Amino acid sequence: MKRGKKYAEAAKLVDRAMQYDVEEAISLVKKTAVAKFDETVEAHIRLGVDGRHADQQVRGAVVLPHGTGKSVRVLVFAKGDKVAEAEAAGADFVGGDELIPKIQNEGWLDFDVVVATPDMMGVVGRLGRVLGPKGLMPNPKAGTVTMDVTKAIQDIKAGKIEYRLDKANIIHVPVGKVSFTEEQLRDNFMTLMDAINKAKPSSAKGQYLRSVTLAATMGPGIKLNTIKLA
């Protein structure tokens, strides 16, 4: 993969053999973000678990104290009085059965998070093949299958993020924007790490945090000292 001059210059600031403390890593992420847009700061956390086993799944959600810096579009599947409640709470889209063909046949995906009341999961289940691979399927563990749609929407709008393992047992999540202060990024990152440490499965053996890397969207990865994060 060919990288540009700016990336090469930024990469020189990072010692690949070094594992940085949180403060140093965040400072470096800001220094190595050279794109013209406000880059997202992402955390990539490789865990010593095997996600193929149900008892070693690591999945949940956490509200970042300073949000993600991105406005999130929320789609709510609801019926009855929950429709008005969702609209009043600030949902961007609210509906039921009528949304199925729009998503399935027309490929409409102009939303970032899907919330559903439990009585709508039969309807939402028909969208599994579309929403599942995109990580958009509502899930009780993430708080997106709930009767309390007001709280769900407010949390998401405030900066709630979902974390889950990919096939390589790595969690990829945003922790803010490069324009955030170092303190804001640190608060967000430590809140995330606290949640992931608490979510450690009892069946996980050996080292839980295998590697933790921070990077801006277009910047080089910066490895953190995992011992200090455990």
Image (spheres, grey):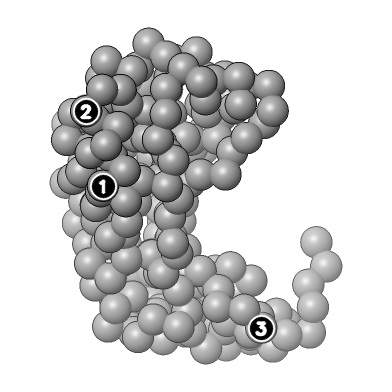
Q: CB under 8 Å between callouts 3 and 1? A: no
Q: CA distance from mark 2 to mark 3?
A: 45 Å
Q: Position of residue 181 (x, y in %)?
A: 35, 85
Residue matched to label 3: 36
If you read the primary sequence from the N terminus, does the residue marked by circle 1 or circle 2 appear first? 2
Q: Secondary structure at mark 3?
A: loop
Q: Nearer the viewer, mark 2 or mark 3?
A: 2
Residue 214, visible in the rendered structure: no
Vertical position of residue 35 compared to residue 66: above or below: below
Mark 3 Cα within 10 Å, few/some/many (few <14, many 20+)?
few
Vertical position of residue 179 compared to residue 212: above or below: below
Mark 3 is on which residue type?
Lys
Q: CA distance from mark 1 to mark 2?
A: 11 Å
Q: Secondary structure at mark 1?
A: helix
Q: Nearer the viewer, mark 3 or mark 1?
A: 1
Quarter-wise, where is residue 79 in the image? top left
Q: Position of residue 55 (x, y in %)?
A: 26, 22
Of the numbered discs in the image, which one, if any, rests on residue 81? 2
Q: Position of residue 134 (x, y in %)?
A: 55, 35
